[in-house]
Image: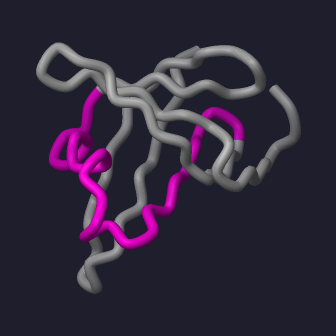
Amino acid sequence: MGTASEQAPHDRDVHRTALGSHLRTPVGYRRAGDTVTISVSLPERKTWWRNFTGDGGPVSLHLDGENRTGHAVAPVDGKGQVTVTVRLDN
């Protein structure tokens, strides 16, 4: 699975089924093992991350040339910043 920690700017896709359709967007991320962290720039202007608020939900990511599934959660901190954390399935 690559190195213990990887960083890639804006070259991976996040997929989430919402209301029967798939949403696809490129994102920058950091990866450590089976955890992928996505910092959302200008979250007030974007909507995709809102699918993962509260208890979060299922997600698929295109990583290293293959699709991986997992569970994503997107808490908003006290300053309005959003970081989506994905725990990849094995």
* Picture quarter with the N terminus: top right
- Lateral position of residue 52 relative to residue 36, left or right: left
* Picture quarter with the C terminus: top right
Who's the residue at 19% across and 25% down the image? 18
- Tell me the magenta residue range: 33-57
- Lateral position of residue 74 relative to residue 15, left or right: left
Q: How many discs appear?
A: 0
* Image spot of residue 69 (x, y percent): 49, 19
Looking at the image, the residue that sits furthest to the bottom is 79
- Lateral position of residue 68 relative to residue 64, left or right: left
| Colouring scheme, one of rainbow, by chain, secondary structure, one colour | one colour
Picture quadrant where residue 4 is located? top right
Who's the residue at 45% across and 69% down the image? 41
Who's the residue at 45% across and 48% down the image? 85
Using the image, determine if residue 83 lies above or below residue 90.
below
- Lateral position of residue 66 relative to residue 75, left or right: right
Picture quadrant where residue 76 is located? bottom left
* Image spot of residue 2 (x, y percent): 86, 32
* Image spot of residue 61 (x, y percent): 54, 27
Q: Is residue 49 magenta?
A: yes
